Image (cartoon, rainbow, N blue to C red):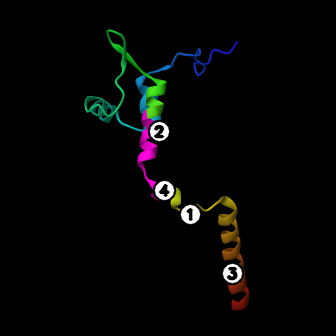
Amino acid sequence: MDTSHTDSPPGTSRLLRIREVLHLCGLSRATLYREIKLHTFPAPVKLSARSVGWLQEDVARWLAARIAQRGPAYDAAPRRNASAAQESAATADRGRDRSQCEGE
């Protein structure tokens, strides 16, 4: 039987605990609570007297908004793929091999 917590019933949202939120967002605990106080991060849901959680959908929306804020410079930057890097390394190796042969 699958007991993973990643599947939630339709129409509901999974609650994330603070460790998972911090891991997903890459923020420190102090920064997270500062962002909540400034109303720039979703507020937690109170679960009990000493327990809170964040709706997964809220955190996902916050992350998507942050990604959208990075601007077009990231989208326009040329990206080297792995094959281009390998070809460049192979060309450099051939150049070194030739210089070593000529030096003999």
Marks 4/2: CA distance? 15 Å
Marks 1/4: CA distance? 9 Å
Of helix, strand and loop, which mostly describes the magenta segment? helix
Amino acid beneath label 4:
Tyr
Q: Residue visible at 59% across and 22% down?
A: 6
Amino acid beneath label 1:
Pro
Q: Which mark is residue 64?
A: 2
Closest to the observer, 8 or 53:
8
In this figure, which residue is indicated by the disc labeled 4? 74
* Residue 48 locus on image (x, y percent): 36, 9
When the figure is inspected, residue 5 is found, relative to residue 60, above or below; the finding is above
Amino acid beneath label 3:
Gly
When the figure is inspected, residue 63 is found, relative to residue 75, above or below; the finding is above
In this figure, which residue is indicated by the disc labeled 1? 78
Marks 3/4: CA distance? 33 Å
- Mark 4 residue element: helix
Marks 1/3: CA distance? 26 Å
In this figure, which residue is indicated by the disc labeled 3? 95
> Which stretch is magenta?
62-73
Residue 1 placement, left or right of 70? right
